[in-house]
Structures are given as structure tokens and as C-alpha cells.
Image: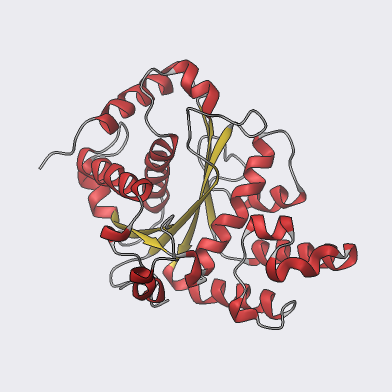
Amino acid sequence: MSLISLNGISHILFFDESGDHDLKTIDPSFPILVLCGVIIKVSDYPTVELLISQHKERFFDNPESVILVSRWIRKQEGPFRILSDRRSRDEYFNDLNATISLAQIKILMMIVDKKAMCERYSEHVSPYELSLMFMIERLVTEMNSSPGRVKRAMIIAESRSSSKHRKLISEVEQGLIAEEHLRKEDRELYSAFSQILTGGTSYISANDLQERVVDLKFCSKLRNVAGLQLADLCAYPGAGYALGRPSPAWNIVQKKLCGYPRYRGNGLKVFPYLSSAQNKAVKKALEKLKRPPTA
């Protein structure tokens, strides 16, 4: 993968979301935010890329131009119009589920009940930022559990910057979007990321975080990155599970969660349904996110 220099990096965490972080107008039919992170070892990434490419080649005439986006698949938009036929749709989903099942990945998932969060906490920190903090904690914990030399990770998120702006074309072609071209939401997320690494969390020190997590980069959807596509595909089944509408894909996704079969509290966190002790830790974390970073 040519997106970034991978010198000294052992893992990449790709993440995407299902839902939005708006706390002012909450959709009663979808009152949650799901942040899904896919951890891939750098040594495994070429094989994962190959699996995704082969899946596309089995169904599309121009596979290199196809980007796997959950919403487009469900709505049968663009190249996914082929799924309007029931038989083709069943064949496609069976193959997609098998592809995800074969991929050497681990999943971290944070599910936020936005309504319950607003009712329980007066500090309305972005649920996206809070989810990022939990995900970084679990990423570091996961790497610390692996034997051998010190593991270090790069985090890559899908940028919410518009690719329509001409000045972004060079960054889009390179994959990574320059910080000055990021939308407000992405700049705020990067600021929160910097605060987390500078201040540490209730469970992991700043020194440990800075030793394990190299940086957060933003990448355009147009780059067609296999890891980001997997994060997008795995987020929606998590939302269905949280809303009491689990799909067959959830059976695949849950087996990839860190700590499976005991993934609750490990690979999967549901917020704010926490114990009293965890609640205290969350309140302390919220205070950290509100605090400006130190020099």
C-alpha cells in the first residue's frame, strides 16, 4: 500500500462510521452512532487487498473502478444495480460475507446511544471523539497483548472533505488529504486525537499512547482503499445489531471482534450502558477531551 510510509509500523487501524454525531437533531429511527475500526497487520494487508480485488472481479466488468460502500450496495446504486435481481443479490452477498470471513482482520466497534448520552451526561462532547478515544485504548491494548517487539500503529479514517474541489485533486490522487483542506469535522477529530495522545486516558498513559500510535491520517473514499471499505461494510451490521435488527452479516462481523467470543467490553463497547466504575472513568475522559492540549 503506497498511501503512507510504513517504516516501523506493524498495524493499521482503518475506521468508518454508520450514523452521525449530531446530538441536537436525533433521528428516532436511528438514534445511534457506530464507529467501526478494522485492524490489519501490515504483513497481512497485501492478502486482504487481493481478497477484495478478487471479490470485485467475480461480479463487475470494471472491478478496479468499484468502491464497496454499504449504502450504495443496500440502495443498489451505481455498479450495484446488478443486485436488483434476487438471485444475483443472494449470490453477491454470500460471496461478500465469505470474503470478509476470510480476511485476516480484527474489529473494534463502539456503539453510542446518542439520546441516552445526552440524558446522562451534561458535557456534550462529540460521540465521535469519545468513540475515537475508546478505540485508541482498545487498539493499544490489543497490540500490547501480542508477543514480540513493540507494536506501532497508524490510524486511517475516511475524510469527509469534498472531492469536488479542484484544489483537492492532487491530494485525492495521492490518497491522503492535506490538513488545511479538511472539513471542520475532520479538523476537530484530529484535534481530539492530538489531545488524547498528549493527555493520555484513564487507562493508558500519554507516553504509552505516543509510543504505540504514530498518527491519524485522512483518506479520500475515491482512493479505493481495501481497509476503509471493510470498515464501512462492517459498521452497518453493527448498527443493525444495536437496533435489534441483526443481519446475517453480523454473524460474520462478530466473530472478527477483538476478544471473541467474549467481545463485550473488549472488541465491542456500548455507551452509555456502563457500570458505575466505568461511568466515573468516562466522566474523567470527558473532562480530558474538553481540556486544551498542553504544549
Tell me, yes or no, if residue 131 can be seen here: yes
**Residue 146, quarter of picture:** bottom left
Question: At 71% from the left edge and 83% from the top edge, which residue is drawn?
Answer: 61
- Residue 14 placed where, x, y %? 46, 58
Question: At 72% from the left edge and 78% from the top edge, which residue is drawn?
Answer: 60
Tell me, yes or no, if residue 95 can be seen here: no
135 relative position to 87: left or right: left
Residue sitting at the far left: 295
- Residue 50 placed where, x, y %? 58, 78
Q: Nearer the viewer, residue 133 or 123?
A: 123
Up/down of 64 relative to 210, above or below: below
User: Which image quadrant: the N terminus?
Assistant: bottom left
Q: Nearer the viewer, residue 149 or 137?
A: 137
Scheme of image coloration? secondary structure
Residue sitting at the far bottom: 61
Question: At 31% from the left edge and 49% from the top edge, which residue is drawn?
Answer: 187
Up/down of 290 relative to 207, above or below: above
- Residue 5 placed where, x, y %? 30, 73
262 relative position to 83: left or right: left
Q: Nearer the viewer, residue 108 or 219?
A: 219
